Image: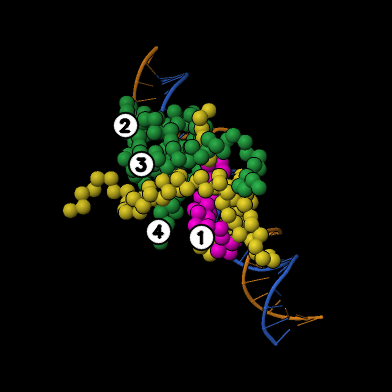
Chain colours: A green, B yellow, C orange, D blue
Amino acid sequence: MSDDLAAALSVVGARWALLIVEQLLDGPQRYGDLQRELGVPTNILATRLRELEEAGVLRRLPLRHNTRAYALTDRGLALREAIVALGRWGEDQGKDHDQAQNQDPS
Amino acid sequence: MSDDLAAALSVVGARWALLIVEQLLDGPQRYGDLQRELGVPTNILATRLRELEEAGVLRRLPLRHNTRAYALTDRGLALREAIVALGRWGEDQGKDHDQAQNQDPS
DNA sequence: ACGCCGCACTTGTTTTTTGCAAGTATCCGC
DNA sequence: GCGGATACTTGCAAAAAACAAGTGCGGCGT
């Protein structure tokens, strides 16, 4: 079964996961930054970060004392293309989403 | 707000949504086909198809009597790139995803 | 004509996921 | 040693998903 998409979604398909990765594409960030930027509930954020770390998408880098940063691994960075592609698609989606279904103007 | 990704995910971010679209990239298919190919619960499938239709991603084409097919619209087809990108990423994901940080195997 | 089957769904009900609010632990500066 | 910042837990309610069974409709065989 070549269902690579299902494999991908089992890692980054959960809610907020891709948004977290997108945010980290701009560089490593701390927990509180992600929280404030994305507006993600704190327990969900903690859960996702754990999952994504275990999946090898990101890793914790300890900073000073009780602060640390989350940074994408190579595998995480490899999501950029997919995220950009989805983002582009989302652009057009935002325009008008009234049922403008034109496929064959007769 | 350049959060196009969030806009995209609000449409195709729900569980099974992208898999349904992927399946339809191979051409129009019927309800039962999607169900059997993907193994998606029937009530979820019905819900997603309704949502995706309302979002202009796909449309119903009536076939004979009480059968119909689901086909992607142009907007739905435009998801191909994103799906391919995610699929490619998922390929590599499949290799080994043990959370072995740096455990020397030998 | 009538029952039966396949197709495309609904309609309960349970389980899982998400969200919200509040609390805990640790360190740092004062 | 107190207050505030940072990084999370924990408890509980709401929402979504999965499971199981049922409905309506049309065609087909008999």
Distance from disc 4 to disc 2, alpha carbons, whole Å, reads 38 Å
Quadrant in the picture for residue C2: bottom right
Which amino acid does the dot numbered 2 rest on?
Pro
Marking on residue A78: 3
Asked whether, in this view, residue A83 is left or right of residue A106, the answer is left
Residue B78 against residue B43 in the figure, above or below: above
Q: For the magenta stretch, what is the residue range?
A: B9-33
Gap between marks 1 and 3 measured at Cα:
26 Å
In the rendered image, which quarter is residue A67 located in? top left
First in sequence: mark 3 or mark 2?
2
Q: Is residue A15 magenta?
A: no
* Number of other residues with Cα within 10 Å of mark 3, as a class: few under 14, some 14 to 19, many 20 or more: some
Q: CA distance from mark 1 to mark 4?
A: 12 Å
Find out whether the residues at labels 3 and 4 contact each other: C-beta distance under 8 Å.
no
Residue highlighted by disc 4: A2
Task: List the residue tagged with mark 1.
Answer: B38
